[in-house]
Amino acid sequence: MKRKRPSQPRSRAKREDTTPSRGVFTRRALLVLATQAGVLGVLGKKLYDLQVHEGDHLRDLAARNRTSKRLLAPARGQIVDRFGLQLAGNKVNWRALLMPEETTDIHATIARFGQIIALDERDQARIERDLRHIRKYVPVALKDFLSWDDMARIELNAPSLPGVLIDVGTTRLYPYGPQLAHIVGYVAPPNERDVASAPMMALPGMRAGRAGIEQTQDLLLRGAPGSVEMEVNSKGRVMGEMDRVDGQQGDEVVLTIDAGLQQMVLNRIGDQAASVVVMDCRNGEVLAMVSTPSFDPSLFDSGVSHAQWIEWTNNVRTPLINKTVAGVYPPGSTFKPAVALAALQSGLVNPQDRFTCPGYYDMGGVRFHCWSRWGHGSITMQQALMYSCDVYFYLAARKIGMEPIKAMANGFGLGTKLDIELPHTRAGVIPTPEWRQKRGYHWNGGDTVNAGIGQGFVQVTPLELATYVSRIASGRNVTPHLVRKVNETASERTPLDIAPSLQIPDEHLAIIRQGMFDVVNAPRGTAPKARLSLPDVAMAGKTGSAQVRRVSRALRESGHFNSMNLPGKSAPMRSSSALLLMMPRAMPLRL
Amino acid sequence: MIEHGNGGADAAAPLARDIMTDTLLRDPVNHDHAPGQAVADAE
């Protein structure tokens, strides 16, 4: 009986032991469970945030760590002549680029690159300039026109050149070089203003038009940029190309120029300093436009050397200036048809009125000479044009005054800024008393007399003269232009049948045209050497010789006057310009 | 226009004649393709 008792407390004790420990375990378990649940919850929340909330952003960051994306400069549009011959195109240019954001020490990388591929002072200066102005994500061109050996050396040393990559781009090509430099123009690396106006211009290989058609049609020629996505390693080395979207090439600009004719004209000119404009007098299409001497436009693509620039700018024959649109010269006797038309239009001079030329004209104590020492006698307007008599036009100018002459000359394109697709064009000057007074000088009768033969203050450009003679030939307001179409879209042309009339009576134009026909074809005309030997082709024309220096009476009377023999420190001091305008006697029928 | 060319009748006239002859023989306005050796053949 007593054996059972001790068992009771044991079992009680056992019960007492068991109950509290189970409670502790339960609390601890709950605590652990709660902790685990909390941790799991936090992890789950974090995982949810990473996967769902920030998933896209983080995926993008990861991809950026693995890939490098950059913009590609588009190929510049072509410029072609009227038959599709390439006047400005692109050639392949393998080059080394540096991605500044993919190297930790830019200058160390450049220095290392310089040990592998020689960088001259100009390269280094350009790289420094680009690094200062270009954003970090835009690559900087280290070296253009790499050879295969250059590229092999760069690839071999790739591990020590972080951020350096080899890229293929294009550079401008001018197949006709100096022959069309003044028309086509040239491109040059963009400046800060270009980049500010269009960030695309910061891309390596982008060029801005700086002259000629390249400048005036620059926005059309630029195109739209493309992009390339590359796989890179942790050091920024390119491991492969993942995606490429080529840029959109700029528009193709088709000119009215015939490159073959341009070449022929240049061959005829030889090494003379001259300007020639061949224009279709029915619609103003410029077929050839030559200004000599010229220059090599491709030299501007990577920057002209200082020595070359000095050579060009010190050259008295001004090779960089397109003289056809920016050179102003006294028109000399080529101005006489305009004076004749103004005289007829004024009603103060009739075609059959005769003026007497004794070889000179005295006014206010000054003697104005005719080019013929013996004079031309009593002559009509048509004869005056044929002989190019100076005295007739002295008298005509004095009779009508400068205002009608200016109005007529301007109407025919002289002394006006012509709207042709070229930059840096200048307008000539048809002076009037008011024009002179604005400059603080008094206009006198002698100024009118001089202007009557295209001397004194009268100045025109060769393009103005070409427009002038085209308008005499057509009687219409034809305007010169160089762009025929852009891509396949024809530019607005001005055919003969819609160009507005100049409102000059046909009988007046007929007198001028006949006088100019006689210049070339009559036995006593001044330009028999301009007569064509082609059958059934009759041309009209007008000669002109503009003198810059005053000729003394003694020298003139010696009979040995030749401007090339005049003394002078430099050629311009004794310069004279020889001009000839030519036009068809009758307008061709076909448009 | 010829700079320092002295007289237009002597210096510019022969040049203008040759250029006009080339232009008329080549006749670029009435061709759709670049004329070949028309001028050279004619001469």
Image (spheres, helix red, strand yellow):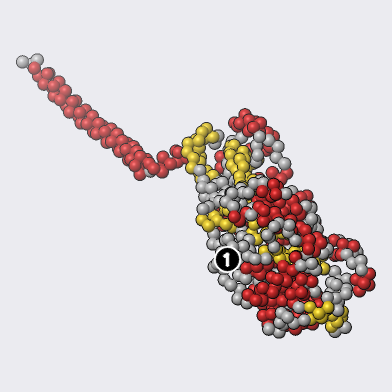
Residue at 70% x, 37% y is A118
Query: Residue A518 in the image: x percent, y percent?
Result: 74, 68
Q: Would residue A130 be visible to someone looking at this image?
A: no
Chain containing mark 1: A
Residue A162 sits in quarter: top right
Residues A286 and A66: in front is: A286
Q: Specify the amino acid type for callout 1.
A: Leu
Dot 1 lies on which element?
Answer: loop
Give whichever of A98, A324 is nearer the camera. Answer: A324
Q: Is residue A352 visible?
A: yes
**Where's the C terminus of chain A, which quadrant?**
bottom right
Task: Name, please, the residue furthest toward the front.
Answer: A535
Q: Residues within 10 Å of mark 1 (few under 14, many from 20)?
A: some
Residue at numbered disc 1:
A496
User: Can you give x and y, in whole percent of width and height, for residue A21 in the image?
Assistant: 21, 28
Question: Looking at the picture, how far across and down is residue A281, in whole percent?
Answer: 63, 64
Give the quadrant of the N terminus of chain A.
top left
Residue A394's image quarter? bottom right
Q: Residue at x 79, y 53 (%)?
A: A271
The quarter holding residue A519 reads bottom right
Horizontal arrangement in the rendering, residue A257 relative to residue A61 (left or right):
right
Which residue sits at x=88%, y=83%?
A: A365
